[in-house]
């Protein structure tokens, strides 16, 4: 992994280092400080390569990491791993729909006016099944199947 990152580093940074050496060392000793016309384009392109390398490095490290690849494949395959310590709260519970005539929420959707709501025992106290038995299988009159 490290060798691949080093190869990319050398490839993207060497043009900028060559441009710096050319402008500071070779050119200053031979000419009077004038840069050739192609140099500005070369320096600009080498700066783009350096910025591209800086943007590419996190992706290189991520793709070359085994942990990242393993996690990415799990996400792509939509494989969900369940933690063994988490309890399943709905294993021994049956879900039922409550009948409309004992459902307090249905009272308001059935044109109940404000005056009738004040005296509505179902709205204020809830259905009788809340007070009877916690074993819902004994209260068949309240549920729809």
Image (spheres, helix red, strand yellow):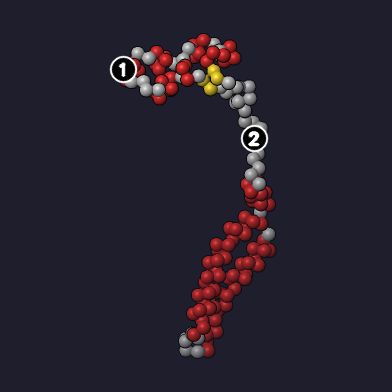
Residue drawn at x 59%, y 70% as measured from the top left: 12
Residue drawn at x 40%, y 22% as measured from the top left: 110
Q: Secondary structure at mark 2?
A: loop
x, y percent for residue 9: 61, 67
Residue drawn at x 62%, y 57% as measured from the top left: 61
Q: Is residue 28 something that shows in the picture?
A: no
Do the residues bearing badges 1 and 2 touch, measured as CB atoms within 8 Å?
A: no
Q: Which mark is residue 83?
A: 2
x, y percent for residue 19: 54, 78
Tell which of 57 and 75 is nearer to you.
Answer: 75
Left or right relative to 123: residue 30: right
Marks 1 and 2 sit apart, C-alpha to C-alpha, by 52 Å
Q: In the picture, residue 123 is in which quadrant?
A: top left
**Which residue is under mark 1?**
115
Q: Secondary structure at mark 1?
A: helix
Answer above or below: position of 109 versus 121: below
x, y percent for residue 62: 62, 55
Tell which of 36 and 119 is nearer to you.
Answer: 119
Q: Which mark is residue 68?
A: none
State which mark lies toward you, 1 or 2: 1
Left or right relative to 110: residue 87: right
Answer above or below: position of 97 versus 45: above
Quarter of the picture holding the C terminus: top right
Tell which of 38 and 128 is nearer to you.
Answer: 128
x, y percent for residue 53: 57, 65
């Amino acid at each position: 992994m490290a060798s691949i990152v080093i190869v990319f580093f050398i490839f993207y940074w060497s043009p900028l280092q060559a441009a710096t050496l050319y402008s500071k060392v070779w050119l200053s000793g031979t000419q009077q400080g004038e840069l050739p016309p192609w140099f500005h384009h070369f320096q600009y392109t080498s700066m783009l390569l350096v910025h591209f390398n800086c943007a590419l490095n996190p992706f290189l490290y991520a793709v070359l990491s085994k942990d990242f690849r393993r996690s990415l494949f799990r996400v792509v395959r939509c494989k969900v791993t369940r933690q063994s310590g988490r309890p399943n709260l709905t294993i021994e519970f049956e879900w039922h729909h409550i009948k409309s005539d004992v459902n307090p929420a249905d009272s308001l959707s059935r044109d109940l006016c404000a005056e009738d709501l004040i005296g509505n025992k179902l709205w204020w106290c809830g259905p009788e099944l809340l007070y009877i038995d916690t074993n819902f299988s004994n209260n068949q009159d309240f549920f729809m199947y």
